[in-house]
Amino acid sequence: MKRKLMSLVLCAAMVGSMVGVTTTVHAEDEINIEIVSKGFQHQFWQAVKKGAENKEAELGCKINFVGPNSESDIADQVQMLNSAINQKPDAIAFAALDTEASLDAIKQAQEAGIPIIGFDSGVPGAPEGAILANAATDNYAAGELAAEETYKLLKDRIANADGPVRIGVMGQDATSESIVNRGLGFIDKIGELAIADGHKVKLEGNEKYVGDAKVESSDDGNVIIETLVPSQVTSELSAIDCQTLLNKEDTICIYGSNQHSGDSMVVGNENLQKFGTGEDQVLGVTFDSGAVIKAAVADGTFAGAVTQAPVAMGEAVVELAYKAAKGEEVEDIDTGCQWYTAENMNDEEIAQNLYD
């Protein structure tokens, strides 16, 4: 009896030991990824988080997604990045609000051997080799997409015009790499398509955009592309820029290169009511979504808009971080963008990327 009891005890101890070993190995093998975004409450970041969680479930890794309440809370984000590093994860995904403010933390992660993946606008200006790869929208290509879809709607109107026509471009600023590239992509592609149809292009407005544009500018151009940038980033000043363009008799289209500009276009149009798709109206197109822009697209105030793909971005950044954590080579992923209109904005593939 004592021998049987002893055997049972030994077996139980061995089984317990085996279970313990199995659990430990699983914990050690599980890849942990800290994700520090630019925000958390905004629907865009919630969509990114959804994509990250989709990929987490697929790969069997563990993610922790954090971000400050506001995209102006730089100090909060830096603190979150430091906390992420202190967790000693296998990889970190980071969308920097201010790279310079994050440099010490980035250096600390490098010294600890933690690979960093950038996403959204990435970590521009980071030390060479600090960011292994980025999951982000190709903003120049996104601007080109907006231009291609816009030109389809303007082609005949330009061809049949009695005189010069004006296409306005509204930029929130002339410093943000992502916003500038969206503007330049639009300007260059619209210009390219117009010139291919035998027209001449004249560039006017903000010196940064005029100077960096690839399209050839002619003083006698019949397609005028004018870019306006407010002296300060306020909705009031951007709305005034919109009104300035709407009040020019030759304006046939205005493009806003981000949500701020798109929202301001709606405000600027409130009293003028000039946006629409009719021959005597001004075509409105913009970038991003948000409740105001979605409503303007749905009711026909805007002809359409380009949205980023935040769900795909979340999936891509976890995939890159997972590979980096395993020591695999990684390279940038363009997470793409989509053109949406009143006709397709409720399609599942597009609707999941339209945030409020």
Image: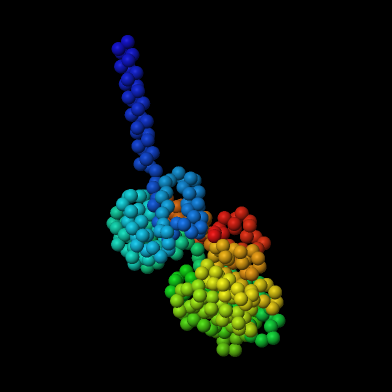
Is residue 295 visible in the rendered structure shown here? yes
For the point 43% across and 62% down, which residue is it?
Answer: 70
Q: Position of residue 317 (x, y in %)?
A: 45, 55
Quadrant (top left/top right/bottom left/bottom right) for the N terminus: top left
Residue in the foreground of this view, choosing between 129 and 78: 78
Residue 71 x/y as whole percent: 43, 63
Answer left or right for 108 relative to 349: left
Camera-side residue: 249 or 144?
A: 249
Asked whether residue 141 appears in the rendered view, the answer is no
Say which residue appears at 33% left-offset and 17% top-offset. 7
Coordinates of residue 150 in the picture (x, y in percent):
62, 72
**How is the rendered protein coloured?**
rainbow
The answer to whether 292 is drawn above or below residue 186 in the figure is: above
Q: How far from the left and from the top, in percent, is residue 274?
A: 64, 76
Residue 160 location, quadrant = bottom right
Residue farthest to the bottom, as pictured: 220
Quadrant location of the C terminus?
Answer: bottom right
Residue 2, placed above or below residue 260: above
Image-based side of 79 in relation to 292, left or right: left
Residue appearing at x 36%, y 38% in the figure: 25
**Above or below for 13 versus 127:** above
